[in-house]
């Protein structure tokens, strides 16, 4: 199935090199729809039906044991239901390295839909089966789905994209996460599925993006870098490049991948232990760990704890708060889209530094406004503006770029192990915030946000000092930019010329051999 290139240039991704093909955009959208969209949806979908789910737990307990469940038990069951999502994510992150090695990037994304469909069934039918265990297991399984998705998807997007739009295509991950959060907020409104008789259908929706991805993704190519470097399928890689780029002559792209392959000492997929031991990628690994930890520990997840309370303090009626809260999801999605449009012009490093530093500023202002909230009637409105500003700052860079960097800072053989480590850091940090923030909030009250100010400032300083700009660079170029800080010799220009010449010689030899075989026939 040959996907035609779009006529003319797309304003959204217009470049001086070539237009973006329908094949590439379809691969980016549908792979993210069944992956990061579901992750974002599951972040917000349990908020609106929380009271109904707790009531279901109480009714089920009463039917089983003939007595109402204790308050502490309900709180425990609800805490497990919410937090087990992160445990599932960690399990998914731990398994992704092996799965992508066996099934490839696209194959992993397709397999992952099975987890989404099973989770959708369990979560939807749990109420009818009078089993809160089904809801808990369903949340665990959808967590596994998200853990795999947040590693396999950025890997796939990074490997199918030309270097001049790799950041923009990579931001599909962040945009669809935000869109998933916003969709969960909209469907959870009382007029839609946020009712006592409909809340279980919120989880039925999980099946639709998974089914759409299963219908479309099989017709799109696998990662050409995976096909060439790990499967040794040069013909398949060439066809994949041709479809993604919309041109017949992809010799330059094939040469780039060959050069990366020959520059690596070990072409086999490296294990996590090998990655940790290799001094040539030490600072790349430290950078990913720091960036991914800051992604979760910067305080965005904690901001949701205050949103409803601030709106109530501002005098908004309780019944309209869900509609006002939609503004957070809208701002989140809008900021992610703008970041995707600007990333190739501004670069990864400036957006990350701006995002974390702006979050530090607005968290500081939010702390001040919260402490004066009861002294002036209009102060809660400023607090809410700060919340929107924190969300916009996060989505302008820190919300999606850490996943892009994980794919860019490592060459092919180290990439699966790097995503596995990044995933572990991501989900452990996510779990830590959910576990520790209530205690921080109880101890420090509104001053709890100053902890996130410190984390954002430290992340900003590290990125300013260590991170090189990766915009419009090949994976080999990015790896070489870390050579000095890793204290290893960078390949000389003459070595790169030798690589290119050897690739051309190999290609010429193959052409000559093919011609001889054809003449002999």
Image: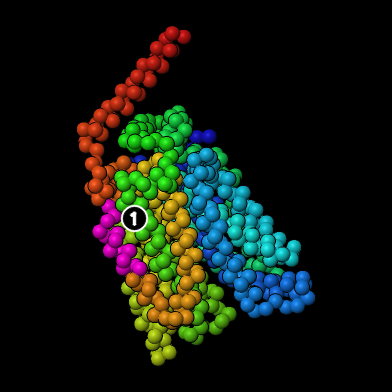
Q: In the image as oriented, which residue stretches furthest toward the top?
A: 520
Compared with 77, 169 (above or below) is: above
How far from the left and from the top, in percent, is residue 159?
Answer: 41, 43
How far from the left and from the top, in percent, is residue 477?
Answer: 29, 43
Foreground of the two, 404 or 265: 265
Q: Which residue is mark 1?
A: 287
| Range shown magenta | 455-468
- Which residue is painted at 26% across and 60% down in the image? 464
- Which residue is painted at 39% across and 41% down in the image? 412
Q: Is residue 319 visible?
A: yes
Rendering colour mode: rainbow
Position of residue 469 in the picture relative to residue 318 (left or right): left
Compared with 361, 411 (above or below) is: above
State which quadrant residue 518 falls in: top left
- Which residue is painted at 29% across and 26% down in the image? 502
Q: What kind of element bears circle 1? A: helix
- Which residue is painted at 37% across and 73% down in the image? 451
Q: Is residue 381 visible?
A: no
Foreground of the two, 22 or 119: 119
Using a 10 Å C-alpha cutoff, classify the residue at mark 1 as few (fewer than 14 neighbours), some (14 to 19) or many (20 or more).
many
Foreground of the two, 117 or 341: 117
């Amino acid at each position: 199935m040959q996907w035609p290139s779009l006529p003319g240039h797309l304003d959204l991704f217009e470049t001086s090199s070539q237009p973006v093909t329908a094949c590439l955009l379809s691969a980016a959208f549908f792979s993210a729809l069944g992956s990061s969209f579901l992750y974002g949806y599951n972040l917000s979908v349990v908020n609106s039906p929380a009271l109904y789910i707790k009531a279901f737990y109480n009714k089920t307990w009463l039917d089983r044991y003939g007595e109402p469940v204790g308050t502490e038990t309900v709180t425990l069951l609800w805490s497990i239901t919410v937090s087990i999502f992160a445990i599932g994510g960690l399990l998914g992150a731990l398994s992704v390295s092996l799965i992508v090695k066996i099934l490839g990037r696209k194959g992993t994304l397709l397999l992952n839909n099975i987890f989404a469909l099973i989770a959708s069934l369990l979560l939807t039918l749990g109420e009818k089966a009078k089993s809160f265990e089904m809801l808990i297991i369903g949340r665990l399984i959808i967590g596994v789905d998200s853990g795999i998705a947040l590693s396999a998807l950025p890997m796939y997007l990074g490997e199918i994209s030309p270097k001049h739009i790799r950041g923009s295509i990579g931001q599909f991950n962040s945009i669809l996460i935000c869109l998933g959060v916003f969709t969960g907020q909209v469907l959870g409104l009382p007029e839609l599925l946020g009712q006592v008789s409909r809340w279980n259908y919120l989880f039925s929706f999980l099946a639709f993006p998974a089914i759409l991805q299963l219908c479309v993704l099989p017709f799109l190519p696998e990662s050409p870098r995976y096909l060439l470097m790990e499967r040794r399928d040069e013909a398949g890689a060439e066809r994949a490049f041709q479809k993604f780029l919309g041109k017949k002559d992809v010799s330059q792209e094939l040469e780039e991948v060959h050069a990366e392959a020959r520059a690596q000492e070990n072409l086999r997929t490296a294990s996590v232990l090998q990655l940790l031991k290799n001094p040539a990628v030490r600072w790349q690994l430290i950078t990913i760990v720091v960036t991914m930890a800051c992604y979760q520990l910067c305080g965005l997840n904690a901001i949701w704890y205050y949103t409803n309370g601030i709106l109530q303090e501002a005098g908004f009626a309780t019944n309209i708060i869900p509609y006002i809260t939609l503004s957070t999801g809208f701002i989140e999605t809008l900021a992610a889209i703008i970041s995707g449009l600007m990333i190739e012009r501004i670069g990864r490093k400036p957006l990350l530094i701006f995002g974390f530093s702006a979050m530090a500023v607005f968290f500081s202002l939010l702390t001040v406004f919260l402490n004066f909230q009861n002294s002036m009637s209009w102060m809660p409105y400023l607090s809410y503006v700060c919340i929107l500003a924190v969300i916009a700052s996060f989505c302008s860079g820190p919300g999606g770029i850490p996943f892009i960097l994980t794919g860019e800072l490592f060459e092919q053989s180290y990439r699966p192990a790097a995503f596995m480590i990044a995933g572990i850091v991501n989900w452990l940090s996510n779990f830590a915030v959910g576990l520790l923030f209530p205690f921080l909030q109880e101890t420090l009250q509104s001053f709890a946000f100053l902890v996130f100010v410190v984390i954002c400032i430290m992340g900003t300083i590290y990125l300013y000092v260590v991170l090189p700009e990766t915009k419009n660079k090949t994976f080999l170029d990015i790896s070489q930019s870390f050579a000095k800080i890793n204290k290893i010799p960078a390949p000389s220009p003459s070595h790169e010329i030798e690589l290119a010449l050897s690739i051309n010689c190999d290609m010429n030899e193959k052409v000559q051999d093919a011609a001889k075989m054809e003449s002999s026939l």
